[in-house]
Image (cartoon, rainbow, N blue to C red):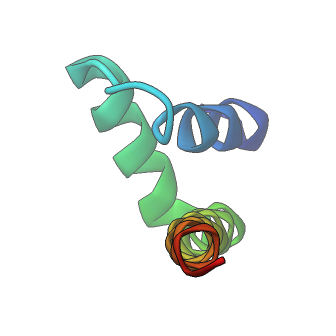
Amino acid sequence: MRCRQATRMISESHERSLDIQEKVGLKVHLVMCSRCRRFQRNCETLSEMMKKFRGTETSYRINR
């Protein structure tokens, strides 16, 4: 698997469940590629930040 495929799958994994073949291929790639591991961590951090923002936005609307 190439980095372009791995980053696409990492992004897609936030939208849908990957099938077993995709998961295995991605895990193998991540073992070997520090850049894609960093991309995955950054995506996870961004996803968490978005969830927190949504919660803040909701409480702001309620308190207004």
Quarter occupied by the C terminus? bottom right
Horizontal and vertical percent position of residue 34: 63, 74
- The answer to whether 1 is drawn above or below residue 19 in the figure is below
Horizontal and vertical percent position of residue 32: 52, 62
- Residue placed most toward the observer, 48 or 63: 63
What residue lies at 36% left-to-right and 49% top-to-bottom?
27
- The answer to whether 9 is drawn above or below residue 7 in the figure is above
Residue 41, image quadrant: bottom right
- The answer to whether 44 is drawn above or below residue 2 in the figure is below
Q: Residue furthest left?
A: 20
Q: Residue furthest right?
A: 4
Quarter occupied by the N terminus? top right
Q: Residue furthest front?
A: 64
- The answer to whether 15 is drawn above or below residue 43 in the figure is above
In the shown orientation, is residue 48 left or right of residue 35?
Answer: left
Horizontal and vertical percent position of residue 58: 54, 66
What residue lies at 62% left-to-right and 66% top-to-bottom?
50
The mark tally for this picture is 0
Residue 36, image quadrant: bottom right
- Residue placed most toward the observer, 39 or 47: 47
What residue lies at 66% left-to-right and 73% top-to-bottom?
42
Horizontal and vertical percent position of residue 18: 34, 25
In the shown orientation, is residue 59 left or right of residue 61?
Answer: left
What residue lies at 41% left-to-right and 25% top-to-bottom?
16
